[in-house]
Amino acid sequence: MLHSMTGFASATGNLAPYSWSWELRAVNGKGQDLRLRVPDWVEGLEPQLRKKLAAGTQRGTVTLSLKLAREEGVGALRVNSAHLNAMLGALSQIEDAAMNVGVSLAPSKATDIAALRGVLDASDNEETLTPLLHTLLREADNLIASFNDMRAEEGRALADVLRGQLDEIEGLTAKAQKCATARQQETCETLKRNLDRLLDNADGLDEARLTQELALIAVKSDVTEEIDRLAAHVVAARELLKGGGPVGRKLDFLMQEFNREANTLCAKAQNTDLTRIGLSLKALIDQMREQVQNVE
């Protein structure tokens, strides 16, 4: 099964006193680029989410956002000991500096210090954060599954489009083969007529050298190899689609090979009908390559 690199999923949840909302989205990318915006005060949440996303995706720029809120007034106040000690040390230095210049400071009260920013912390404790962490991780599994379901659905649609385009390429390649076969006989006859004309109107012309040059021109205009490679690329692309999985890079490389053969076919065509077929191939290959850019 193919997966599209683009996808979206969202969810909401709650576990008193918390509530949250998720958003998971992805766009095309050359590699796997995971971008997480989650609260850092839930210890262990981000690395575990990153691990789950890395396992659930192969390519693309994937962005996961989690907005987490706590009900106002819930949670016991706690003294931030580290911040308090740092604050007391700073106050002591200020008082010593004031005494050295003869400035008297009013004595500080506990309520004054408690009012300082960061001294009292209403942060959550392990008893509430551990269940929250487990719940969020379970929900993340469901969110990623929903996200991948959407990408798989888009992947199926992409595969159908790509198979249809491969059918068209195969049909145009068959037409190119018929046209090249007909053109080959015409080209040989034209070369022979030109050779006879030159030999009839030129004295002392090296017939062997001239024949060699004409043969070289015929070889340069031969498109058999290009047509054979196009047919082989069609088979290879179908095998990739059949196998499924993260084949976007391989398909993209194959599109470059398709385009190279179509360009060479046009360059060697020397025939209106064959040139028209070659241009149609190029246009179709460009359309297919645009679709391949979405495949994981």
Image (spheres, rainbow, N blue to C red):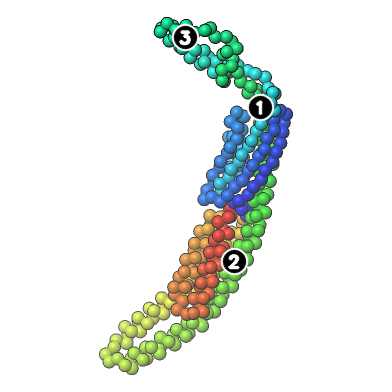
Can you see residue 131?
no
Q: How far apart in space, not on screen, are marks 2 and 3 (Cα)?
A: 82 Å
Question: Closest to the observer: 12 or 128?
Answer: 12
Q: Residue furthest left?
A: 204
Can you see residue 288?
yes
Q: Which residue is mark 2?
A: 166
The quadrant in which the N terminus is found is bottom right
| Residue type indicated by callout 1 | Leu
Q: Position of residue 15 (x, y in %)?
A: 72, 31
Callouts 2 and 1 close, C-beta under 8 Å: no
The residue at 46%/12% (across/down) is 94
The residue at 33%/91% (across/down) is 199
The residue at 73%/29% (across/down) is 16
Question: Closest to the observer: 193 or 69?
Answer: 69
- Element carrying mark 1: helix
Q: Which disc, if any, is residue 95?
A: 3
| Residue type indicated by callout 2 | Leu
- Element carrying mark 3: helix
Q: Which disc, if any, is residue 129?
A: 1
Q: Position of residue 185 (x, y in %)?
A: 48, 85
Few, some or many residues within 10 Å of mark 1 (<14, 14–19, 20+): some
- Element carrying mark 2: helix
Quarter of image, res 80:
top right
